[in-house]
Amino acid sequence: MPAVVAHGRANEMYACAYCHLPNGLGRPENSSLAGLPAAYIIQQLADFKSGARKSSDPDFKPAFNMVSVGAKATDPEVQAAAEYFSAMKPRPWIRVVESKFVPKTHVAGWMLVVSTPHETESIGDRIIETPENLERTELRDDTSGFIAYVPPGSLKRGKTLVTTGANGKTIICSTCHGPNLRGLKNVPALAGRSPSYIVRQLYDMQTGARAGVNIPQMKPVVANLSLFDLIDVAAYTSSLEP
């Protein structure tokens, strides 16, 4: 593991593995990096550094931290981290479950965690992504993944949007993201990635908060999608084998 991934830089920069984990699979508040093309990772750091990529929510600290990393990381550090995460093989990390009722949760550590005492509530039009085991997740145990509760019917609706374009509402995702949505050349994979992350990124592309080299190609993809469509798309792509 490169030094920048394992340790970062004292008092200046978080270790990459602190947020994205040693296995590169990440958490709902950030991105999974495992298996992404190294060139793509390098470009995203450059976009954070230039200000082209940011969050629609100015108070979303994980994105703010990445802007800081982009500004402070040296080219050799970025290259080393990109090559490390790119060489990792993605694996199933998020269990997607359609459910009308979900555990009550609250925000802690930039993600949703199950509240105590344990009670349930209607999922409504939400994705509830939470650790399978909170204690292990907080210890950065990279063998303990997540469960994502999604609205009933979202997987079917998402599949229609992703695989057919829904009569011109959007563009078939595999055109750019490859067969089975596992990535193609320098285009990232979608399969098996955090649905919370996917919704945030699609929304940021719609609002213009996320710009950069490849975003003009995504503009027509997201232009006509409602927030409910974004949820359906993310639910389906996250359910796929990475």
Image (cartoon, rainbow, N blue to C red):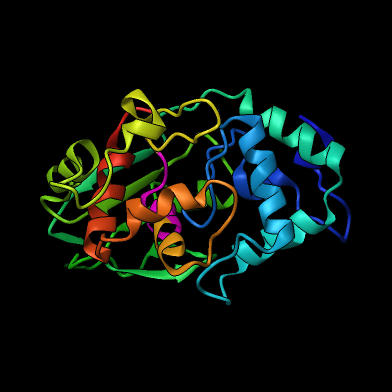
Q: Nearer the viewer, residue 142 or 224?
A: 224
Residue most extreme to the bottom: 59
Query: What kind of secondary structure does the magenta stretch mostly adopt?
Result: helix
Q: Quadrant of residue 226?
A: bottom left
Location of the N terminus by quadrant is top right
Whole-percent x, y for residue 198 in the image: 40, 51
Does 27 lie within the magenta span? no
Q: Is residue 84 above or below residue 239?
A: above
State left or right for residue 94 relative to residue 215.
Answer: left
Does 195 lie within the magenta span? yes
Q: Nearer the viewer, residue 23 or 194?
A: 194
Location of the C terminus by quadrant is top left
Q: Quadrant of residue 124?
A: bottom left
State left or right for residue 12 relative to residue 224.
Answer: right
Q: Is residue 5 above or below residue 226?
A: above
Q: Measuring 26% from the left and 60% from the top, which residue is drawn there?
A: 225
State left or right for residue 50 relative to residue 178.
Answer: right
Q: Measuring 49% from the left and 36% from the top, which residue is drawn there?
A: 188
State left or right for residue 31 relative to residue 78.
Answer: left
Q: Nearer the viewer, residue 233 or 21?
A: 233
Whole-percent x, y for residue 71 in the image: 80, 58
Q: Quadrant of residue 118?
A: bottom left
Q: Measuring 20% from the left and 43% from the top, which residue is drawn there?
A: 165
Q: Is residue 55 above or below residue 73?
A: below
Q: Measuring 27% from the left and 65% from the top, which residue is drawn there?
A: 227
Tell me where the magenta segment starts and ends, as one range: 193-201
Whole-percent x, y for residue 59 in the image: 57, 77
Q: Nearer the viewer, residue 181 or 154?
A: 181
Whole-percent x, y for residue 16 in the image: 71, 45
